[in-house]
Image: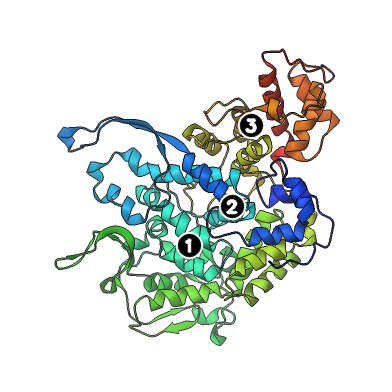
Amino acid sequence: MPVSDPAPNPIDPFYVLTRLGYGPRPGDLAQFANQGFPRWFDEQLHAPPVDEPEVAQALSVARLRIKYGAGDPAKNQPWPAVDEMRPLTMLNQPIEALWPMLAERDKHASQERRRPLIEVMAATLIRATHARYQLREVICNFWHDHFNVDAWHSEQVAVALPAYDRNVIRPNALGNFHQMLEAVATSTAMLYYLSNHSSRAGAANENYGRELFELHTLGRDAYLNDKYDRWREVPGATDGHPAGYIDEDVYESARAFTGWTVEDGAAIDGGRKLPNTGKFAYVENWHDGYQKRVLATDFNEFQPPMADGKKVLDLVASHPATARYICRKLARRLVSQTPSPQLVAAAADVWSKNIHAPDQIAKVVRVIALSPEFAQARGEKVRRPLALVAGFARATGLDLMPTEPLINTIADAGQRLYGVPEPTGLHDDLRHFSGTNEMRQRWLLALGLAQNYWGTGVLNPEAMTPALVRNYGEVAAYWLIALTGSSDPNQIVAITAGMNIMPEQPLDPRDPNLGKRLALIAAYAAMSPAFQSC
């Protein structure tokens, strides 16, 4: 396995494991110290293509409740009542195995059509908690935000979500951007979310074309229609290298993607219909084959199947504005809200030089994570609710069992997994997570996990507490170190005062409430600013 150049400055191991992962488990810091940052980081970049055994085991034993009443035979609803703890059966199913819930919707309760979404959310929590390859989970979360689809308000997207996560995002998260971009463009989830499944010659739907430019590739800063309304006027256009895009590029790209659709039983012409499998399909009859021009590049008429759309993807994936836009987003996620222009430029340079490399994204992440700017950015980010839950479970040894009430509380705290209505995805902004209600919910997440409010698993703090710990102040210090990497005397006093206990009060093994007290101390430590940030 290759080893990166060492980081230029000493770096805090706890910070690395919290920013490039979801926090250390017991023993992780010692392992990190043995490996060193560069070797640990290269191992993370070379994650295996499938879940490691511990994650696979956790997924296999997970159970989620599903409950609904019997259907009404008078309305041709044949299903019986269901109330069961069901394993995660849909994560690895091909989309054609799940699509009948839509194709034959009268035979299936609506809760079944929502189930694929629930299972992917549960799997996300399990992977964040149990995965050894934490960086992969962090970057997968980044790409789900970047290529956002809202599965909470669309049954088609909900049913397609396991395939989207499994076949589009996860295998490409540290791979090649162009390859991922094409996988996204042909995914059922995105085709429904941005309505391209219904785009036809003569009635091209512009939703996907506009978001492709504005959110997926070049970015809003490259939108130049407020300055130029003719393609020739865009700087660099006459040389074939336009500095940005205008509305004409959006309109023409929408034409290029006509006919990219889903096998959903729609009529093609005459007596022909598409199959009803949920898989991607290209329908030549629906494609606008006439001449086009996108980003100052002429497309000849009547090209081979899908050639127009693929050419658009080639153009936007290789545009310099795409390199700057996405590298800035990656730096914002991994470093700070305001990464330096120098860091963004360095990352964009690596991006452009490796445009065809199979590990293009991994190379860019390496540049960002091994930068001095990353090493000095501790405390500049707020942990997202998913990271709070996973970090608390990892530090406390909680064998987390996801449940819908927990998932709903994560949403209340500001992170509705796979359910952001806007195509921008979840905002990477401190203000989004620091409102009054969001902060209350963030504290509730720690308290609820510690006291098992939602049936997520019983915390055993007595087993975790070292034998040498003699009083409640030392317990508070232990959990602050486990959860934040350091212990602050003022926080120790605040935690014990909140429980009406003096720090020097000794532990009493005969106290029937000892376990509850220790769990509460862990929860209070997780409410500290040092745990809420990273």
- Note whether 241 is above or below 154 in the view shown: below
Residue at 39 percent across and 78 percent down: it is 307
The numbered mark, 2 or 3, whose residue comes first in the sequence reads: 2
Which amino acid, by three-letter code, is at mark 3?
Ala
460 to 219, vertically: above or below:
above
- Residue 377: image x %, image y %? 77, 52
Residue hosting label 2: 137
Name the secondary structure under disc 2. helix
| Residue topped by disc 1 | 211
Quarter location, residue 461: top right
Q: Closer to us: mark 2 or mark 1?
A: 2
The residue positioned 68% from the left and 52% from the top of the image is 20
Q: CA distance from mark 1 to mark 3?
A: 37 Å
Element on which disc 1 rests: helix
Separation of marks 2 and 3 at Cα, in angstroms: 21 Å
- Residue, x 67% and y 25% (percent of image)? 519
- Quarter holding the N terminus is bottom right
Q: If you read the primary sequence from the N terminus, does the residue marked by circle 2 or circle 1 appear first?
A: 2
Q: Is residue 121 visible?
A: yes
- Residue corresponding to mark 3: 446
